[in-house]
Image (cartoon, coloured by chain):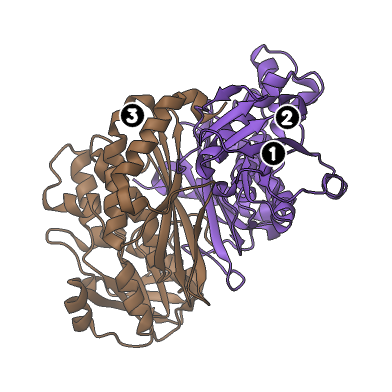
Chain colours: A purple, B brown
Amino acid sequence: MTAEQALGQGGEFDAIRELVARWGSRASGIGDDAAVFRLSRGDAVVASVDTAVEGVHFRRDWLSAREIGYRAVVAALSDLAAMAARPAGILVAITLPASLRESLIEIGDGIGEAVDLVGTQILGGNLSNGAELSLSTTVFGSAFAPLARAGARPGDTIYVTGVLGGPAEAIRRLLRTESAGEYRERLVRPVPRLAEARWLADRGAAAVIDVSDGLIGDAGHLAAASAVCIALDSAAVPRMRGIDVQDAMNGGEEYELIVSSSVAFDVRAFAERFGLALTPIGRVIDGVPGTVQIDGSRVVRPAGYDHFSRR
Amino acid sequence: MTAEQALGQGGEFDAIRELVARWGSRASGIGDDAAVFRLSRGDAVVASVDTAVEGVHFRRDWLSAREIGYRAVVAALSDLAAMAARPAGILVAITLPASLRESLIEIGDGIGEAVDLVGTQILGGNLSNGAELSLSTTVFGSAFAPLARAGARPGDTIYVTGVLGGPAEAIRRLLRTESAGEYRERLVRPVPRLAEARWLADRGAAAVIDVSDGLIGDAGHLAAASAVCIALDSAAVPRMRGIDVQDAMNGGEEYELIVSSSVAFDVRAFAERFGLALTPIGRVIDGVPGTVQIDGSRVVRPAGYDHFSRR
């Protein structure tokens, strides 16, 4: 009944030892029945879990094992960015079919790469046998005043980081078995906007959400949580070359941030600091709560749903 | 590529809404991109993740959906007990085949039951589609001075809580398609010894581990982490009626605690407080580090392995 019996004690032992050795100092926190970490006095713990399942969240014919590990961790870290939290560490629960045993180290390397990118560490985890490849990543962070979705107020400006449309276009091309070309990088190597979120929070951001369901869908979640209407200007939406505006506003898996703020941000300072665009794309108005207007007329009540969130 | 596209937005929305409504005040912490909680000043955060996969960690013909949810959470909570931590909350990541959609509420009821039992709450989670049923439970706790496995010293007495052998005997009978009888309850309704661990820690326990791989295996993990030898007296091992001593010492999934202490515990006060046996079963000696002796002669170097743990 235990994983040890299923995988064979030696096999699992070796696999975990190999992973931990490979992670080196990135996994220095691993040990005991549970991980232990401390926060600065007064900080709250911020935590989230995200699962990536083969065939549902990724396809092995599109991504390397390393990219699968990297993306699973980034998707989870992006939820910390949406709270403007500093990462404190991650736990990785990997379920692995025996046939993919030889991919484990590559998956681990991708996990290590994501952890390095944001300067955090692997605090522990779990390795199980199973019929399908699945990664559940728990991320922990800390924040003195975590930002939520509920802070947007009429009169705020809505900003978005980065340029949109790349991941959706990459998926569309891959579905047609074409090369994803210049769009592939945005799909396989998203960046969690952690430092960007803290920069924005420090300068007065009122509410933040990350773009996982698409700009319109996630703007709708922000609008619903804040009980406001968000009016977007489609022409202002920054998009990759060759992407039309509808696709830029509907594509998911971006991991960029939508930010609501009553304070005007210095977008040039942001661009200089992060090498990334910060673009005003609309404003918060006193319309039907939980809705999104586009170009002043169309009213959209988003149907997208973000896991386990309050409405 | 997202769970929304895979499950259908309406379906996932409804499923999560149903679960959260069912959990009521147990899930009052759910919301936003990540969960937020605060600790008492000076406390450390203690965190662990455990995955239960159908066919590896449980069988649906042996357990009800409610029991599957309950056991998955208890197995994770037991790691907090092994650190003598107070639970602060859990995150539940559920991967569910479409064919089991109607079992989700029952699974959720089992999760709620485990949460109620220890007085904690559901802080958030994730619901994904997938080919096999799988639950990854992340547990958070807090402790001023988390207990670890590394504190056992020569001269300590080794104690174990409860009576052993029930879960292994239940599995053996179920494998023969017999009724598990009086042993079934110990398999399907294990209890995480959280309050017991804190009682023991408050009275001077030096090291604790929970019995998931079996008494000998987990005593070996404790011995290895503490670089000591543990000598067990097989006749002293408390076991259920009808269980032989070898089975009591080798069966896993107990979620009882092995405790090392230089202070003698008042086992009668423990029994009165918790309605549970606390039994001295051996001592820590200056033998080969990381080994277990049974009845003074046999030396066992355990092969069991606990997920992602330091050796």
Give A222 or A167, whichever is nearer the viewer: A222
Q: CA distance from mark 1 to mark 3?
A: 32 Å
Q: Which mark is residue A164?
A: 2
Q: Is residue A69 visible?
A: yes
- The answer for which chain carries disc 3 is B
Query: Identity of the amino acid at label 2?
Result: Leu
Disc 3 crowd, CA 10 A, few/some/many (<14, 14-19, 20+):
few
Residue A310 point in image, percent of width and height:
45, 44
Q: CA distance from mark 2 to mark 1?
A: 8 Å
Residue under label 3 = B101
Residue B235 point in image, percent of width and height:
21, 72
Q: Residue furthest front?
A: A286
| Badge 1 and badge 3 in a common chain | no
| Element class at badge 3 | helix
Query: Identity of the amino acid at label 3?
Result: Arg
Q: Which residue is depicted at the point 61% across and 27% down?
A: A293
Residues at discs 3 and 2 in contact (Cβ within 8 Å):
no
Looking at the image, tell me whether mark 2 or mark 1 is earlier in sequence order.
2
Q: Disc 1 or disc 3, which is closer to the eye? A: 1
Residue under label 1 = A256
Residues at discs 2 and 1 in contact (Cβ within 8 Å):
yes
Residue A136 point in image, percent of width and height:
52, 43
- The answer for which chain carries disc 1 is A
- Quarter of the image where the N terminus of chain A is located: top left
Q: Which residue is depicted at the point 68% across and 13% down?
A: A177
Q: CA distance from mark 3 to mark 2?
A: 34 Å
